[in-house]
Amino acid sequence: MGLVRWIAGPRACTEIREEFRVHRDECRAALVAQGLAPEQADAEAAHRFGDEEAHARRCESELLEERLGELRRAAAIAATCGLALVGALYASASESSLPFHQVFCLHLLYGLPLVLVAGACAARLGHWVVRYGLLGLGVLVFWLELFLGTHMGYGAWQSMDSPPEEAFADGAQLLGSLLAGWLPGFFLAGTAFSVSALASRIGSPPRATG
């Protein structure tokens, strides 16, 4: 299944087949040790374990369902954390810069949860192309929303009645968000990735080998 390879990774698919062959070979060796001829042991082992392709498809389907469930849970937790951070940022806005923070937080309402979701979900993906692609997309979206939020926030601040002098000091902030806006996105995505990966290792039971 191609989707399993992209989500769980080719290594997981290979391990499914290797585990099947190891158990089948162990069964064959045990039958030979009991006195069966090698040809009879091969036939009996094949009868007990069935077709390798059918077994692989069934296990890959179960693995895909498990990984999709993990992705949904990780995305929900990361999105909730992102929205909570935006709410806390909005609540801490000072009265003098309230128009700026209103517009700025409105843009972060999309960028911050998305970069956390991208980082958390990337930790649960097996294929490196999908993993780093999702991380890059999250950082890029957050970078764009950070720049637009700064630009539009200062515009709203400047359009209020009797704006303070600070409302027109937007040049350095805009340049900084444009040139270095990827840094906070990279930090947030990396943090979400690390926390999600750690939670996955702690919460995953050891894989049965017998």
Image: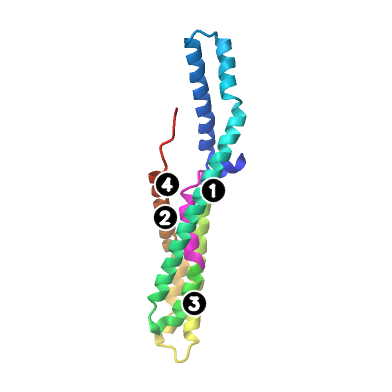
Residue 129, percent across and down? 53, 47
The residue wearing badge 1 is: 68
Crowd band around label 2 with a 10 angstrom C-alpha radius: few (<14), some (14–19), many (20+): many
The residue wearing badge 3 is: 103
Indicate the amino acid at tag 1: Leu
Residue 137, percent across and down? 53, 57
- Viewer-closest of 85 and 101: 85
User: At numbered mark 2, what does the secondary structure look like: helix, strand or loop?
Assistant: helix
User: At numbered mark 3, what does the secondary structure look like: helix, strand or loop?
Assistant: helix
Q: Residue at x 53, y 24 (%)?
A: 21
Q: Residue at x 47, y 53 (%)?
A: 74
- Viewer-closest of 189 and 69: 69
Q: Do the residues bearing badges 1 and 4 touch, measured as CB atoms within 8 Å? A: no
User: At numbered mark 1, what does the secondary structure look like: helix, strand or loop?
Assistant: helix
Quarter of the image containing the N terminus? Answer: top right
Q: Which residues are magenta?
A: 110-131
Give the CA distance from mark 3 to mark 2.
26 Å
Give the CA distance from mark 4 to mark 2.
15 Å
Q: Quadrant of residue 100?
A: bottom left
The residue wearing badge 2 is: 190
Indicate the amino acid at tag 4: Ser
